[in-house]
Image (cartoon, rainbow, N blue to C red):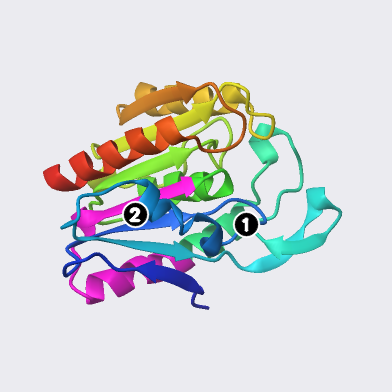
């Protein structure tokens, strides 16, 4: 099953790509306006892709159907993400990455970014992806496996840049959950960078400036 998506092409032919994953109940359209807010150079060559998660019932929301990368059956960190659903979404994201490879974008020129549920997916997919990626941007999120890294992490992405952002006043994903994920990555030898902001479960202007700088630097070095 392919994912519906919004694609924003750069002013010149694309040589790299950022796949940006939204959070629970949101959509690709919800984040697409972020591209001009990044204030990239006028001659940049970065393609942005904003896919829509599948529509499905979400247990903690009384079974309401909404866009969700996976079901959430519990607020407990170790069992929050339904791993079968996570793996299904991972397969869909693999297909999306493959479409970029088929279009001539090298894997090491692809950043996987995500917010909240999308951040969980960016970490899970990026850490396990068999080919080297440019980097992983994980915002306001946690690890799908809760207190441990995903199974079968790929050697190919052991040393890629990882940027984690989290709000100190996050009322949806506890700050401690994001910090714990960062600590696990560091303890296992990953090149993870941590930045916190005085904000709730959202993105702010200062953060977007930092993200823009990180994306440009990461892709220029990849």
Q: Main secondary structure of the magenta part?
A: helix
Question: Is residue 101 in the magenta section?
Answer: yes
Q: Real-space Cα distance between discs 1 and 2?
A: 25 Å
In the displayed structure, 166 sits above or below 110; it is: above
Give the image location of residue 75, x and y in percent: 74, 37
Give the image location of residue 39, x and y in percent: 30, 47
Whether residue 50 sits left or right of residue 129 in the image: it is right
Which of marks 2 and 1 precedes in the sequence? 1
Q: Which of 110 and 196 lies nearest the eye of the viewer?
A: 196
The part of the chain drawn in magenta is 92-114
Give the image location of residue 213, x and y in percent: 26, 37
Q: Which of 151 and 4 lies nearest the eye of the viewer?
A: 4
Whether residue 150 sits left or right of residue 131 in the image: it is right
Give the image location of residue 174, x and y in percent: 64, 27
Residue at 25% across / 40% down in the picture?
A: 160
- Residue neighbourhood size for the residue with mark 2, other residues' Cα within 10 Å, grouped as few (<14), some (14–19), many (≥20): many
In the displayed structure, 158 sits above or below 63; it is: above
Residue 158 shows up from this direction: no
Residue 25 picture quarter? bottom right
- Residue neighbourhood size for the residue with mark 1, other residues' Cα within 10 Å, grouped as few (<14), some (14–19), many (≥20): some
Which numbered disc covers residue 157? none
Residue 45 picture quarter? bottom left
Residue 184 shows up from this direction: yes
Looking at this view, name the residue that lies furthest to the left.
221
In the displayed structure, 1 sits above or below 155; it is: below
Q: Which of 79 and 99 lies nearest the eye of the viewer?
A: 99
* Residue ID for mark 2: 129
For mark 2, give the secondary structure. loop
Residue at 29% across / 45% down in the picture?
A: 135
Residue at 34% across / 36% down in the picture?
A: 209
* Residue ID for mark 1: 26
């Amino acid at each position: 099953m392919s994912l519906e998506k919004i694609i924003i092409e750069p002013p010149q032919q694309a040589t790299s790509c950022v796949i940006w994953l939204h959070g629970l109940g949101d959509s690709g359209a919800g984040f697409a306006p972020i591209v001009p807010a990044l204030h990239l150079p006028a001659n940049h060559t970065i393609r942005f892709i904003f896919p829509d998660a599948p529509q499905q019932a979400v247990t903690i929301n009384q079974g309401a159907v909404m866009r969700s990368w996976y079901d959430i059956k519990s607020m407990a960190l170790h069992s929050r993400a339904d791993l079968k659903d996570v793996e299904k979404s991972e397969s869909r994201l693999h297909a999306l990455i493959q479409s970029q490879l088929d279009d001539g974008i090298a894997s090491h020129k692809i950043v996987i970014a995500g917010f909240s549920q999308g951040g969980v997916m960016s970490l899970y997919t990026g850490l396990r992806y068999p080919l080297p990626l440019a980097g992983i941007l994980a915002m306001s999120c946690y690890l799908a496996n809760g207190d441990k890294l995903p199974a079968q992490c790929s050697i190919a992405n052991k040393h890629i840049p990882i940027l984690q952002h989290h709000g100190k006043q996050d009322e949806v994903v506890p700050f401690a959950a994001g910090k714990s994920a960062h600590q696990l990555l560091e303890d296992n030898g990953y090149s993870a960078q941590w930045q916190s902001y005085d904000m709730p479960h959202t993105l702010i202007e200062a953060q977007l400036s930092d993200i823009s700088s990180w994306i440009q630097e990461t892709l220029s070095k990849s």
